[in-house]
Amino acid sequence: MKSTTGPAAYEAWYHAPRGQWIAEREFTLLKSLLRPEAGASLLDVGCGTGYFSRRLSRPGLSVTGIDPDPEALEFAGMQGEAVHYLQGSALELPFPDNAFDYTTAVTSLCFVDDPIAALQEMWRVTRRACVLGLLNRHSLLYRRKKGQGSYSGARWDTPGEVLKTWVPVLAPTPGEIILRSAVFLPQGSLIARWCEQLTPNTLLLGGFLAVGLRK
């Protein structure tokens, strides 16, 4: 998440040097867990300005983005990518069961009051795999940014909570569960980037916690 004042400022963060580096780390990790096949369909829940929706469409996926914020969706629709956007809630997705091959939620469930219910909805409309990007309470980012700026009001989750509380309610039970993390030193300095290359993403201490669930 970023300290912003509106959709344009939010999007601009991704194109600044630090934001670009963080977004690339997050996207690379998400894609490695998603393992998407060209021509498949994907729903991006809480898509905001559509940054990740657009990036996910470029491997040849048919992407739909859903978000409750009409201002963010208007901005997203002006970016010129082949993504379908609509307004709606993560807690009540307006799609039938198994409507999409993949679903994603990138730091959006952190602001949903009932993330488990939202995940159940995502799982309901998923045929193949669901990938979440969460804010990790076991991280340096949490120590530095909790309650500040756009992190105000955000929920910070832990790998243990996801495994013990979130995943067991899903039906059918996921056939594969993978947890990884990235962005260990969030300041994005040269030293931070060097350390990031040397730190395995199996170490679940990065600020960005990725959860991959496959049916």
Image (cartoon, helix red, strand yellow):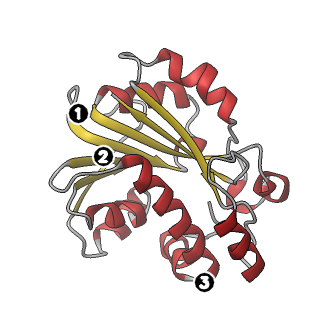
Q: Are marks 3 and 1 in contact (CB under 8 Å)?
A: no
Is residue 64 left or right of 131 when viewed as pictured? left
- Please tell me whether mark 1 sits on a helix, a strand or a loop: loop
**Which quadrant of the figure has residue 102?**
top left
10 Å crowding of disc 3: few (<14), some (14-19), many (20+): few
Whether residue 3 is visible: no
Residue 70, x across and y down, in percent: 38, 57
Q: Is residue 148 above or below residue 205?
A: below
Q: Residue at x 38, y 63 (%)?
A: 50
Closer-to-camera residue (49/141): 141
Seen as rendered, the residue at the extreme right is: 143
Q: Circle 1 sits on which residue?
A: 95
- Mark 3 → mark 1, Cα distance in angstroms: 37 Å
Q: Are marks 2 and 1 in contact (CB under 8 Å)?
A: yes
Q: Are marks 3 and 2 in contact (CB under 8 Å)?
A: no
Q: Circle 3 sits on which residue?
A: 17
**Which quadrant of the figure has residue 128?**
top left
Residue 190, x across and y down, in percent: 73, 82
Disc number at residue 43? Answer: 2
10 Å crowding of disc 1: few (<14), some (14-19), many (20+): few
Residue 169, x across and y down, in percent: 49, 16
Residue 76, x across and y down, in percent: 35, 67
Q: Residue at x 23, y 39 (%)?
A: 100
Whether residue 39 is visible: yes
Q: Is residue 14 above or below residue 177?
A: below
If the image is split into quadrants, where does the C terminus sit?
top left
Name the residue type under label 1. Phe
